[in-house]
Image (tube, grey):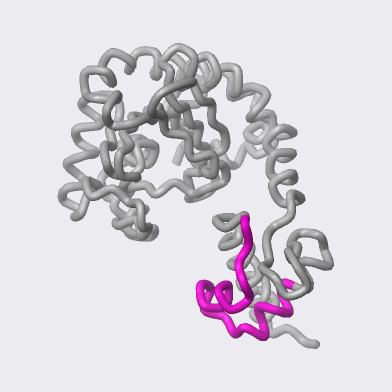
């Protein structure tokens, strides 16, 4: 088969990745027809792709004619990459300590190209009501509604922030999205102005219903270059404005520690272009 400047190859790869990304949200698996409908692909093509992914060990079929689900191989590759990149080895002790000190969920997100991606978590809550999604590592952060996204956007000029949000979409399309996320660009800019003045972002009933979060950017070795964000999240019943103000200092201290330790992230030391790009 001949490929026209990579267009056919790119199309096949894009469709395959769309299936993989969909199955990440459905560990119990989906039928061929459900996958086809969700990814807007013909069922026959989806079936061929699933057969190939099964052959390669990335997908399994529950029964002879059952649902298709990802195998553990995909997640093992992701965890292996984070470990070898030095992110979890260096960052996890900091996250664990912050989680123990504040008793809530801690999330670390790293800038990867034009995206902000959750890569590590630590849970400090051991009893009572707590927020613990357990499925967000590797997920691209929705910038306009998540505390981490707002923290990152606040480090940019308004024009750049609006450009990034416009590319991704202002409104998060999900059943459990919070109703108090910014609904207009004007409202978003007001949130960013408040974040810059306050020194940390706040998102209450914004990314998820019933969840509150606060976040700060992580700056490489205390400079201007932002490499990620650090957030605290928990139920809105506990994380009120007074609680956030009381814990802002420890959150900023942990972010500064991560920024100073970023030299140990082989992900950055082996990809110096990422730091140059982040520096603008």
Q: Residue at x 74, y 46 (%)?
A: 77
| Observer-nearest of 107 and 113 | 107
Image coords of residue 62 (percent x, y): 73, 64
Specify whether residue 206 is painted magenta.
no
| Observer-nearest of 264 and 160 | 264
Give the main secondary structure, helix, strand or loop, of the magenta stretch.
helix
Q: From the viewer's perspective, is 140 left or right of 57?
A: left
Picture mark count: 0
Q: Residue at x 48, y 40 (%)?
A: 133
Q: In the displayed structure, would residue 253 be above or below residue 157?
A: above
Image coords of residue 209 (percent x, y): 30, 44
Task: Give the quarter of the figure containing the C terminus.
Answer: top left
Image coords of residue 172 (percent x, y): 34, 56
Q: From the viewer's perspective, is 94 left or right of 242?
A: right
Q: Residue at x 49, y 14 (%)?
A: 100
Q: In the displayed structure, would residue 20 be above or below residue 108?
A: below
Q: Which residues are magenta?
A: 28-50
| Observer-nearest of 34 and 150 | 34
| Observer-nearest of 128 and 240 | 128
């Amino acid at each position: 088969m001949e490929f026209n400047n990579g267009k056919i190859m790119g199309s096949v790869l894009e469709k395959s990745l769309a299936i993989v990304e969909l199955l990440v949200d459905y560990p119990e698996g989906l039928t061929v027809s459900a996958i086809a409908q969700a990814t807007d692909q013909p069922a026959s093509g989806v079936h061929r792709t699933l057969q190939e992914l099964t052959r390669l060990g990335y997908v399994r079929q529950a029964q002879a004619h059952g649902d298709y689900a990802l195998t553990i191989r995909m997640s093992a590759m992701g965890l292996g990459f984070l470990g070898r990149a030095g992110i979890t080895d260096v960052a996890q002790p900091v996250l664990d300590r912050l989680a123990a000190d504040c008793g809530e969920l801690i999330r670390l997100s790293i800038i990867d190209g034009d995206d902000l991606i959750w890569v590590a978590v630590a849970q400090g809550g051991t009893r009572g009501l707590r927020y613990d999604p357990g499925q967000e590592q590797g997920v691209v952060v929705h910038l306009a509604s998540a505390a981490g996204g707002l923290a990152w956007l606040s480090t940019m000029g308004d024009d750049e922030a609006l450009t990034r949000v416009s590319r991704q979409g202002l409104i998060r399309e999900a059943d459990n999205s919070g109703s108090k996320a910014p609904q207009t660009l004007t409202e978003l800019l007001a949130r960013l102005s408040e974040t810059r003045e306050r020194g940390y972002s706040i998102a209450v009933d914004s990314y998820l219903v019933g969840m509150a979060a606060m976040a700060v950017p992580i700056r490489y070795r205390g400079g201007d270059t932002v490499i990620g964000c650090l957030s605290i999240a928990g139920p809105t019943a506990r994380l009120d404005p007074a609680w956030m103000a009381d814990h802002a200092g420890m959150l900023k201290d942990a972010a500064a520690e991560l920024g100073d330790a970023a030299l140990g992230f082989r992900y950055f030391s082996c990809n110096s272009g990422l730091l140059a790009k982040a520096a603008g």
